[in-house]
Every structure is written in C-alpha cells, then in structure tokens.
C-alpha cells in the first residue's frame, strides 16, 4: 500500500498587523538614526507607536500621550513643519545637505505609509513634538522629539 503525500498545513500569521506595524516602525527607526531635531537644543528623534484611533486629533494625542489637561497643545501643518527641515539653503555645506536629505526621506516615508498626518506641539518652552498619522490598521504612528523654544 502506497502512502499518500501529506498535505502541508498552511500557516496563517494571526499577528500580520503586528508585523506590518513593526515594519513601518523599523523603517522609521532606520530613517531617524543619527538624526536630530534642531531648535534651541538638539533632540533625538524617536519612533512613536500609539494605539488605534478614529482620527488624528488634539484629544486623541492628549489621550495617547497622557498629557495633562491643562498643558497647551498646538496643531501644526505637516508640510509646513518639514519645509524648514528639508529646504536647502545656498550656504549649506555637505553636512547640512545630507541632513536635509535625511529629513526629506523621513517626510516621504511618513507620507507614503501614514494618512492624516499632523504635527502636535505640547507644552511651552520645553516642548514635546509628535508628528503622527494613521497606519493601515488605524494606529497612531509616527515620530516624537523635543524642542526648546524661548
């Protein structure tokens, strides 16, 4: 009696959304490596991975970042925020040009993978900045950094 070949089991990854979420997070982490946000101080830029949200709003960012209700939050335009970081100036040397290109690549990565992108500045003087949008699973995702503005 001949034995029939066994059927291979199809493996279904129940964590596919986690894989997708971690993929954009991994891409963001690579894009922000050795990249600082320049204000009155230089601050590291880090990936931000939030929870599911219906929309990108001040209330949602306040909730997901556990910001005190009395702390001011200002919403800024995504494109305008990146304009200062990506526009090459006549006086730029090689290092400044390379930094502007990294910010352009980061902006393009966020635009290609997230929707409803917005910038939130939380606080006064020492400011937490979140540049976030919604990924394919409606999770608030993006980057976070800090600034000092006097």
Image (tube, rainbow, N blue to C red):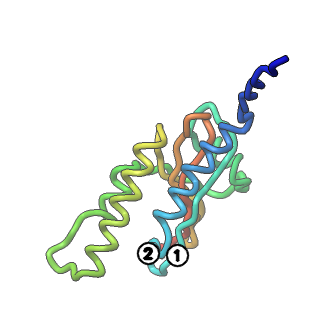
Where residue 98 appears, as percent x and y from the top left, is: 30, 73
Closer to the eye: label 2 or 1: 1
Does 129 sit above or below residue 92?
above
Quadrant position of residue 39: bottom left
Tell me: 4 left or right of 36: right
Is residue 111 or residue 63 the one in the foreground? 111
Residue contact at pointers 2 and 1, CB within 8 angstroms? yes
Is residue 120 or residue 125 the one in the foreground? 120
Q: Which residue is mark 1?
A: 43
Is residue 22 or residue 94 the one in the foreground? 22
Does 33 sit above or below residue 120?
below
Where residue 94 appears, as percent x and y from the top left, is: 24, 81
Tell me: 92 left or right of 55: left
Label 1: which secondary element: strand
**Distance Cα–Cα, label 2 vs label 1:** 8 Å
At 45% from the left and 80% from the top, the residue drawn is 40
Where residue 141 appears, as percent x and y from the top left, is: 58, 48
Query: Looking at the image, which residue sits at the far right?
Result: 1
Q: Which residue is mark 2?
A: 39
Label 2: which secondary element: loop
Does 43 sit above or below residue 12?
below
At 60% from the left and 42% from the top, the residue drawn is 20
């Amino acid at each position: 009696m001949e034995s029939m070949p066994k059927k291979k089991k199809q493996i279904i990854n129940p964590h596919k959304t986690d894989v997708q979420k971690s993929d954009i997070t991994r891409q963001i982490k690579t894009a922000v490596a050795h990249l600082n946000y320049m204000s009155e101080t230089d601050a590291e830029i880090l990936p931000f991975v939030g929870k599911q949200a219906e929309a990108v709003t001040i209330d949602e960012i306040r909730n997901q970042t556990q910001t005190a209700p009395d702390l001011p939050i200002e919403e800024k335009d995504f494109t305008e925020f990146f304009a200062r970081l990506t526009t090459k100036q006549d006086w730029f040397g090689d290092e400044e040009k390379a930094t502007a290109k990294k910010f352009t690549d980061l902006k393009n990565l966020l635009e290609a993978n997230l929707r409803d992108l917005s910038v939130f500045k939380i606080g006064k003087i020492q400011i937490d900045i979140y540049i976030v949008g919604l990924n394919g699973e409606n999770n608030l995702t993006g980057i976070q950094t800090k600034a000092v503005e006097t």
